[in-house]
Image (spheres, coloured by chain):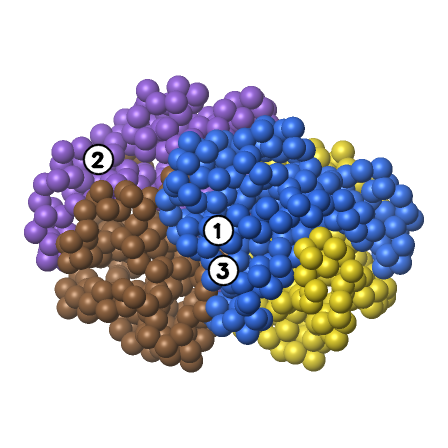
Chain colours: A blue, B brown, C purple, D yellow
Amino acid sequence: MRFATEALSQIQPDEVDTMVRWIIEAKEKRLLIIGVGRSGLVGRSFAMRMMHLGFNVYVMGETITPAIGKGDLIVAISGSGTTKLVVTASEIAKEVGARIIAVTSHPDSDLGKLADHIVLVKGRTKIAAETDYFLRQITGAHEPLAPLGTIFEVSALIFFDSIIVELMRKLGKTEKDMLSRHATIE
Amino acid sequence: MRFATEALSQIQPDEVDTMVRWIIEAKEKRLLIIGVGRSGLVGRSFAMRMMHLGFNVYVMGETITPAIGKGDLIVAISGSGTTKLVVTASEIAKEVGARIIAVTSHPDSDLGKLADHIVLVKGRTKIAAETDYFLRQITGAHEPLAPLGTIFEVSALIFFDSIIVELMRKLGKTEKDMLSRHATIE
Amino acid sequence: MRFATEALSQIQPDEVDTMVRWIIEAKEKRLLIIGVGRSGLVGRSFAMRMMHLGFNVYVMGETITPAIGKGDLIVAISGSGTTKLVVTASEIAKEVGARIIAVTSHPDSDLGKLADHIVLVKGRTKIAAETDYFLRQITGAHEPLAPLGTIFEVSALIFFDSIIVELMRKLGKTEKDMLSRHATIE
Amino acid sequence: MRFATEALSQIQPDEVDTMVRWIIEAKEKRLLIIGVGRSGLVGRSFAMRMMHLGFNVYVMGETITPAIGKGDLIVAISGSGTTKLVVTASEIAKEVGARIIAVTSHPDSDLGKLADHIVLVKGRTKIAAETDYFLRQITGAHEPLAPLGTIFEVSALIFFDSIIVELMRKLGKTEKDMLSRHATIE
C-alpha cells in the first residue's frame, strides 16, 4: 500500500483540475478510454463509473464503441507511454480532432508527446523494493514486491476513483443517481 | 453453406416481422443483447450494426452496459435455449420488466418458455451430415461437418444481418448513415 | 446468402492448403488471432473452435494472452487490410519473429504486404447490390444490401469454419473430442 | 486510501494461507476466475498476473475459456456475494466438481454458502464516510466518498496483488520470469 500512497501523493493537483474540467466540458460529447493490459482494465473500471455518472463513455475494443471525432475526449492510459496499440490509437484520435489526456508515468514518451494534457502518475520507484508493512502482514512475505506495472496500475485505479468522487461533487451527483444507472442484469 | 440455407429458409416471416416491429418500437428505449460462446459473438456482431443504425444497444458483460428496466428490449441468443447464464440473465430481465425475444432452435426450452417472442432458427438437422459441395470444394474434405453449434451460429449471423437490412429499409437509413457511426479509432 | 457463396467460391484451394499446413506445423506453438470490429468477432469464433481442437490459441486484447515470439503463428483478419490497430499489431508480430497469415480482401494492402501468407476472401463486389432471393424472402426487402463489411465478415466466418472441419479431418479429431474441451461454465 | 488500508488490515492471514495453498495445489489444473462488473475487472487483473506466473488460468466470458471439471479451482469475486451470474456460474462449477474460493464481504451470502473456502474482504463500513486525507488532498473534495462497491474493489485488487507476491515467493518466480510471459503484441 505504501507504494501507492507514495505515488498518489505526488500527483499534481493542477493536472487533476484540468482533467476534471476537460471531462466536464465534454459532458455532451463522447469520451473514449484507451488502454491495454492491466492499464486497460483500470480504464474500464473508470469507464463503468463514468457511465454511472451519465457520461457518453466508451472503451476502445468493445462492441458498441462508435465514431470519435472533433471535440470528443480521449483518456489514454499507459505507464510507460510506449504501448504501441495505445500510441497508434492516440495518433488516430489526434487525426480525427479529439483531445487527448494521457495518464502515464512518462510525460516524455510517445504517448506523452501526443497528449494535449498529461496527468503524471508515478510507477515504480525505489520505494517499491522496500519493506511494506501491510503486504508483509497479510502475506508473510519478507521482501514484498510490486512486480511489473503494479504500482502504476493500483495508483491509477485509486486516482481515477478520486476523479469520480470529484465529478460527483462538481456535478451534484449522488450515489443514488449512480445506482440508478448501474447494470441490473448481472 | 447448404446447411445454413436450409436453416434460414425455415425461418417464419411472421416471427421476423414481430421482431422487427418490437425493435422499432424500442427505438428510444434500451436494447440488450444476451448470449455466451459463439452465439454471444454473433450477438455482438448484431449489436455493432444496431449501434451503426443509431439504437441504444448494449451487450451483457461489457463495461458500459447500464441498467435495463421496464419497456427495454432483450434479444437472448442460445441454440439449445438451455445455456444457464443466458437463462439466468433472461429471468432477471423478466423481473425488471423488459420484453424478451429469444433466438433459439428450441422454443420449448427454458429460454423459450421465458421469452415474450421467439424466432426459431434451426440448428443441426440431418442435412448437416450430408456432403456439402462448397466445403468439399474449398477444403477437400470428403465428409464435411458443421461441428457443435456451427449451423445455428452461422444461420443466426446471417439472420441478424438480414434484420439489419430490413431495419435500414424501414427506418430509411443508408449505408452512409451507418458509416458515420462506425468506430474511427481501430 | 448468394453473395457469400460467390465470395467463398473464389477462395483459392492452394491458399487454404498452405494455411492449414502452417496451422498444423504450429500445433505445439502459440497461435494468436488479431482482428477488430466484426472481423475481430469472426476471429474469436475461430479461436473458440481452435481451442476445442486443442490448439494453444489466443486472441489479441483478451486477458490471458501471453508473449508471442519466434515460430508462433498469427492469423490477422481485416477485409480492407488497412485497419491500423491490426496493421500495427502485425508489425510487432513480424518484429518478434512470428509468421503471419492475413485473411483479407486486399492482398496489396499494408496488412497484405506484411503477411507471410495471404488467403484472399473477397468482400463486396457488384453482386452485393443485386436482388438476393433469400434475404428478400425472409425480410420482404426489395433491395437487399449487405452493408459495410458484411460480405467479407460472413464469408470469413464460413471460411474459418471450413478450416476447422479440415483440421478435424487432418488431425483425426471428432466432435466428441471438441465437446470435451467446450466451456462447461456458461 | 485509508478505507482500503482499513479493509485490508482485517483480512485474516489464515484465510489467505489456505487460498495460496489451494492455488499452488492446482498448479497443474485449471483455474477459472468468475466475476462481473468492476469485481470482474479486478479478477482479470489477477488472471493476467497468474498467467505471467505460468498458471493455466482462464476468465469466465472470454473466448478461449475451456471446460472446467473435477479438481479445477474457481476464484469467484463478488462483494455482496449475491450477484446472480456469479452465483449461477459457481453453482455450475460445484456441479462439475471444481473447488470454489469466494472473495466476498458477505460470507453468509449465496456465494459464501456455495464456496469451499472464503476470503473475507470487507467493503463499505462507516469509515467510508469519514474524511480521507489523501482524496481531499488530490481532489480538493471536502466530503470524499467511495461510491458503490469501490472499497471492496480497490481492496480486492490490492489483496490479489499481494497473493501474486506471495506466489512469486513460494514458487521462486522472479519478475523476469513473469516478464517473459507478458504479452508482446499490444
Q: Give the left or right position of residue A130, taking residue C157 as reference.
A: right
Q: Which mark is residue A25?
A: 1
Badge 3 density bin: few <14, some 14–19, many ≥20, Cα 10 Å: many
Callout 2: residue from which chain?
C
What residue did someone put label 3 on?
Answer: A51
- Disc 1 to disc 2, C-alpha distance: 41 Å
Asked whether the viewer can see residue A83, the reply is yes
Look at the numbered disc 2 and give the secondary structure of its residue: loop
SS state under label 1: helix
- Quadrant of the image occupied by residue D110: bottom right
Question: Residue at horizontal 83%, vertical 42%?
Answer: A128
Amino acid type at circle 3 is Met
Helix, strand or loop at mark 3: helix
The Cα–Cα distance between marks 3 and 2, rounded to whole angstroms, is 37 Å
Q: Are marks 1 and 3 in contact (CB under 8 Å)?
A: no
Q: Nearer the viewer, residue A79 or C82?
A: A79
Q: Nearer the viewer, mark 1 or mark 2?
A: 1
Position in image of residue B174 (x %, y %):
19, 47
> Which residue is found at the position 29% from the left and 29% from the top?
C105
Dot in front, 1 or 3: 1
1 and 2 marks in contact (CB < 8 Å): no
Q: Indicate which disc, 1 or 3, sits on the residue closer to the N terminus.
A: 1
Q: Dividing the picture into quarters, in which one does residue D179 lie? A: top right
Image quarter of the C terminus of chain B: top left
Relative to C75, is B66 above or below?
Answer: below
Front residue of C114/D186: it is D186
Q: Percent x, y for residue C21?
A: 43, 28
Q: What is the C-alpha distance between the residues marked 1 and 3? A: 16 Å
Instruction: Report the amino acid beneath label 1.
Output: Glu
What residue is pinned by disc 2? C124
Give the foreground label among 3 and 2. 3
